[in-house]
Amino acid sequence: MKVGWEPLSEPSGPKRIGEALDQVAFRLRAPRAQVLATVFEAWEELVGAVVAAHTSPLRLVDGELVVAVDDPAWTAEMKFFSAELISRINTAAKEEVVTSLTVRVRSR
């Protein structure tokens, strides 16, 4: 039995950070790093300032976007708004990355 560390494959030299993040995201069943940046960094632009003040994206895995709301009343609002939001995100990402929306009530 060998003891110690061995690389999984031959090193191919330095990688761009985006490539490395994309590989990690793929293993976690998440979209590419640029897509995650589009959703998480542009949240206010995607939903508007009023909605963004009460909501935040938590995770995006296997097409499911989980959004936190700060009050149960926002759950109904987000569900009503979900089809439009999914369309906005997919348009901004230039690919279909969100297929469903789940809302969780969470205090900030």
Image (cartoon, rainbow, N blue to C red):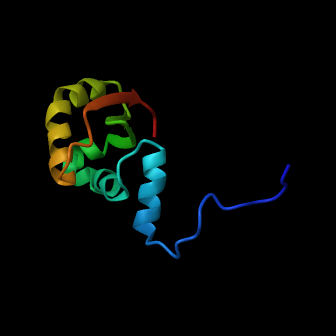
Residue at the image point whose x is 45% and y is 56% from the top: 23
Give above or below for 98 relative to 11: above
Q: Nearer the viewer, residue 29 or 49?
A: 29
Q: Which residue appears farthest toward the bottom when viewing the image?
A: 13
96 horizontally vs 67: left or right = left
Residue 48 visible here: no
Residue 64 visible here: yes
Quadrant in the picture for residue 84 = top left
Looking at the figure, which quarter contains the C terminus?
A: top left
Q: Which residue appears farthest toward the front when viewing the image?
A: 1
96 horizontally vs 2: left or right = left
Quadrant in the picture for residue 76 = top left
Estimate the x, y position of residue 42 in percent, counting from the top left. 27, 56
Residue at the image point whose x is 20% and y is 38% from the top: 86
Residue at the image point whose x is 35% and y is 48% from the top: 31
Estimate the x, y position of residue 93 in percent, counting from the top left. 22, 52
Total label count? 0
Quadrant in the picture for residue 61 = top left
Give above or below for 94 relative to 76: below
Residue at the image point whose x is 29% and y is 50% from the top: 39
Estimate the x, y position of residue 29 in percent, counting from the top left. 42, 41
Estimate the x, y position of residue 94 in percent, counting from the top left. 17, 53
